[in-house]
């Protein structure tokens, strides 16, 4: 009897029907008796100190229960960054914030809270609070914050609060030895996540006298720890539940409002308290992608050989440390994971400023560094007159390369195959030839490429652990409990596929919980770093393998057939030799519950600690049309080619790729959160923040170069974030190919493209 393949098949999402029918309950859908609503009073300056509050009028407003000032809530320092706890204090995230503050670090800082019977009442009362400030200088850029006379944003540490340098070889000598040295100053913008569901959390005291927090978080188990630390209570006193969640992209890898709702409930006798951020608050006052600048030089010989890569990095952290230097400082490892050079130096600083705090966002620093790297790599290919795909083929790391900076051997690293397949599938040569007809006139066309590498999970720089539990139910189905977090990406579906494949039962025989619950579900660090199927999959596979052995052992005892002579196929226990039926999984499950002599429910649990990493790779190819009279860039076609090992669910994978490509295309062309000189966000709404719609994008195409990664539980490796890494530089390079001007800043707005093109034309004519 042939086994049905479940891994690698586009199984229907387990939660699809509930969402289509409106049965999926998100955090805001739960109702509570006597629910109170809280609104955050936000500072109207970006840097300073609150001298006084006048709350008299606000306190008398209808429905107001209480107004909380900084001194009314616990004042423990903590970090909102959603990283696993580190036993080494020196390696923990910087704890530089309290729940409320008088010392303002960013525009919109949390300076007070109003709790009322309705959200509208809380908002009206909040508007009546009068605040008097001492104002301090505002620093919007790392350069300004690092000036010798700049005031410390956090008095206890320098504004440039973290730095690192990695590399190998003699960069200065390698640059000297090169035939050409290309130097660029490249900059990336502040980008917002724009997940569908805004941040929302509710907390209350449960009947066991502990504190329950329901939250749209990516990291329930880490959330419990941070909430407890911020409130100064034992971790065990907090229970976190995560229901259906409307996306996160890293913004919900931050614990921003959860400590507040628990603190408010504690202060108000255990009554349920909810904070629901508006879209405007979510854009302006949660977390963003870091704006990072790169001063980069590369040395290259006429034959295409890279002699050196030299890079100085400034990362704009905003007002609080959050994920901090982990984002800007990681680029050197991944440059080395993609290209080989005789020498490399990557020196990075992360700097406090007074713009919105930057944190985790899909790609975690890779979209920034790959934009810089792939822009200058493309310019180097132009300098020596070499085809840009061939230039990358000459210089990329080989399969089996040991990355000394990442302490990882790059097994099954298929960047070469991605470049070859991309060239053919995109019809690169044909489109490049066709673009020659558009080198004069108003509309110019061009094609561009960018490559990338991407690690799976966080080992060896962070803890990688996960757990899974399986229960055999009486009817032969299985309840799967995992700590890994479903946030809309399809992780629960993929993990259920893995369990079903390992067990040998139909996909729909594996049942998942709707809600992640830290009291009930085993430990996992959460949804980030493209780790869920790679790390959580190991735990699920192990638990399923043990469950399969339990089932077969019971069949062996009952039917006197040696265990090794049996297998499970589509829920049937069969002879390996000829596929004839022995019994069914359902019969063995029923026996485990109700047989008078042998009853004993079948349960398995696995907890794993992973000490390895696999690198994904790939490339993006773009075709654009540029109107030189307006600077408008029209994206004509965009393709991603991915080396992500075995694809667990092709339909889910295609959705991930399409979404990532759209996010990166917008990063390259449209999106940027803007601030005025006072640090106030200017476009924190859906009208002015230029998120693309379907009308702004062409048909997006994802291509997979499948393989069987030796370390992934089913040969799989990272895919969740990879699609968001390289489209933006591919678009930049296509614009350069179209108009002959390499622009070293994104987004490529019409104004920027027009001005850069006009400046280049004047320079060519000698007008400058």
Image: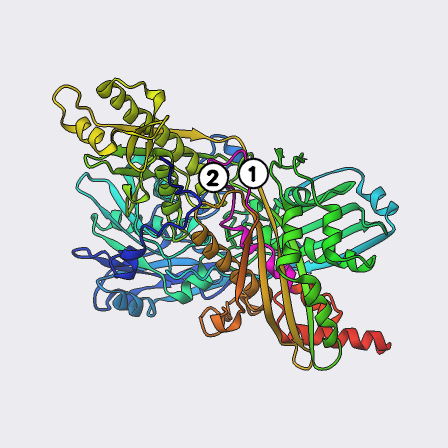
**Relative to 11, does residue 196 appear above or below in the rendering?**
below
What mark, if any, has residue 534 been given in the picture? 2
- Please give the name of the residue rendered at 52% of the width and 67% of the height, measured from the top-left corner: 699
Q: Give the image quarter of residue 173.
A: top right
Can you give x and y, in whole percent of width and height, for residue 512 in the image? Answer: 29, 43
Examine the structure image and report whether residue 724 is included in the region drawn in magenta.
Answer: yes
- Please give the name of the residue rendered at 33% of the width and 49% of the height, measured from the top-left corner: 73
- Please give the name of the residue rendered at 55% of the width and 36% of the height, measured from the top-left corner: 613
Which residue is labeled 1 in the image?
Answer: 614
SS at circle 2: helix
**Relative to 631, does residue 223 appear above or below in the rendering?**
above
Which of these two is toward me, 662 or 274? 662
Examine the structure image and report whether residue 616 is included in the region drawn in magenta.
Answer: no
Q: Give the image quarter of residue 121.
A: bottom left
Mark closer to the chain start, 2 or 1: 2
Disc 2 crowd, CA 10 A, few/some/many (<14, 14-19, 20+): many
- Please give the name of the residue rendered at 27% of the width and 68% of the height, measured from the top-left corner: 120
Q: Give the image quarter of residue 733.
A: bottom right
Q: Are marks 2 and 1 in contact (CB under 8 Å)?
A: yes
Q: Is residue 306 visible?
A: yes
Position of 151 with respect to 13 (left or right) is: right
Q: Which residues are magenta?
A: 706-731
Position of 390 with respect to 333 (left or right) is: right
Q: How is the image coloured?
A: rainbow
Which of these two is toward me, 255 or 339? 339
């Amino acid at each position: 009897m042939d086994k049905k393949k479940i891994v690698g098949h586009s199984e229907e999402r387990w939660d699809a029907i509930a969402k289509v029918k409106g049965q999926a309950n998100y955090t805001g859908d739960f109702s509570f008796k006597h629910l109170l609503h809280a609104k955050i009073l936000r500072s109207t300056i970006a840097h300073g100190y609150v001298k006084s509050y006048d709350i008299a009028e606000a306190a008398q407003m209808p429905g107001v229960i209480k107004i909380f000032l900084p001194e009314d809530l616990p004042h423990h320092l903590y970090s909102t960054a959603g990283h696993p706890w580190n036993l080494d204090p020196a390696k923990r995230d910087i704890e530089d914030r309290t729940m409320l503050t008088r010392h303002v670090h960013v525009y919109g800082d949390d300076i007070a809270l109003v709790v009322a019977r309705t959200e509208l009442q809380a908002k009206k009362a909040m508007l009546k609070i009068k605040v008097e400030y001492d104002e301090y200088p505002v620093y919007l850029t790392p350069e300004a914050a690092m000036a010798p006379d700049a005031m410390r944003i956090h008095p206890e540490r320098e504004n440039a609060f973290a730095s690192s340098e990695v590399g190998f070889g003699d960069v200065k000598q390698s640059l000297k030895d090169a035939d050409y040295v290309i130097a660029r100053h490249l900059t990336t913008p502040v980008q917002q996540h724009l997940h569908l569901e805004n941040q929302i959390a509710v907390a209350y005291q449960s009947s066991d006298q502990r504190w329950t927090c329901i939250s749209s978080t990516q990291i329930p188990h880490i959330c419990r720890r941070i909430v407890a630390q911020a409130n100064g209570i034992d971790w065990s006193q907090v229970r976190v539940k995560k229901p259906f969640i409307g996306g996160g992209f890293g913004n919900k890898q931050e614990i921003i409002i959860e400590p507040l709702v628990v603190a408010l409930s504690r202060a108000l006798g255990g009554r349920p308290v909810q904070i629901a951020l508006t879209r405007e608050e979510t854009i302006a006052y949660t977390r963003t992608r870091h704006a990072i600048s790169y001063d980069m030089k590369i040395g290259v010989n006429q034959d295409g050989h890279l002699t050196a890569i030299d890079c100085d990095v400034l990362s704009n952290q905003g007002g609080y440390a959050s994920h901090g230097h982990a984002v800007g400082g990681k680029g050197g490892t991944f440059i080395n994971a993609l290209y080989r050079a005789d020498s490399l130096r990557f020196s990075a600083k992360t700097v406090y400023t007074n713009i919105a705090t930057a944190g985790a966002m899909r790609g975690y620093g890779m979209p920034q560094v790959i934009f810089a790297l792939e822009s200058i790599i493309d310019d180097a290919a132009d300098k020596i007159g070499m085809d840009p795909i061939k230039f990358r083929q000459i210089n990329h790391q080989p399969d089996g390369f040991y990355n000394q900076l990442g302490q990882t051997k790059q097994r099954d690293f298929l960047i070469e195959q991605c470049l070859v397949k991309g060239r053919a599938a995109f019809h690169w040569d044909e489109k490049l030839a066709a673009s020659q007809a558009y080198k004069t006139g108003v509309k110019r066309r061009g094609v561009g490429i960018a490559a990338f590498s991407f690690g799976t999970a966080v080992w060896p720089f962070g803890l990688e652990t996960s757990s899974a539990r399986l229960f055999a139910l009486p009817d032969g189905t299985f309840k799967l409990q995992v700590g890994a977090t479903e946030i809309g990406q399809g992780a629960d579906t993929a993990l259920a596929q893995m369990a079903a494949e390992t067990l040998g039962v139909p996909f729909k025989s594996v049942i998942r919980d709707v809600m992640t619950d830290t009291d009930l579900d085993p430990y996992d660090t959460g949804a980030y770093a493209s780790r869920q199927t790679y790390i959580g999959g190991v735990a699920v596979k192990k638990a399923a393998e043990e469950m399969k052995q339990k089932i077969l052992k019971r069949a062996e005892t009952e039917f006197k057939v040696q265990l090794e002579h049996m297998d499970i196929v589509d829920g049937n226990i069969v002879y390996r030799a000829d596929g004839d039926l022995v019994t069914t999984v359902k019969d063995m499950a029923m026996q485990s519950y109700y047989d008078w002599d042998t009853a004993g429910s079948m349960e398995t649990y696995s907890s794993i600690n992973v000490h390895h990493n696999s690198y994904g790779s790939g490339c993006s190819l773009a075709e654009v049309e540029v109107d030189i009279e307006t600077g408008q860039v029209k994206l004509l076609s965009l393709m991603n080619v991915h080396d992500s090992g075995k694809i667990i669910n092709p339909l889910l994978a295609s959705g991930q790729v399409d979404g990532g490509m759209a996010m990166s295309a917008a990063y390259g062309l449209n999106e940027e959160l803007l601030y005025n000189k006072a640090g106030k966000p200017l476009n924190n709404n859906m009208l002015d923040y230029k998120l693309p719609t379907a009308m702004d994008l062409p048909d997006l195409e994802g291509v997979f170069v499948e393989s069987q990664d030796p370390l992934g539980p089913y040969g799989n490796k990272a895919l969740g974030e990879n699609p968001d890494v390289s489209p933006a530089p591919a678009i930049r390079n296509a614009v350069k190919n179209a108009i002959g001007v390499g622009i070293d800043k994104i987004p490529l707005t019409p104004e920027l493209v027009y001005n850069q093109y006009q400046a280049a034309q004047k320079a060519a004519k000698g007008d400058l």
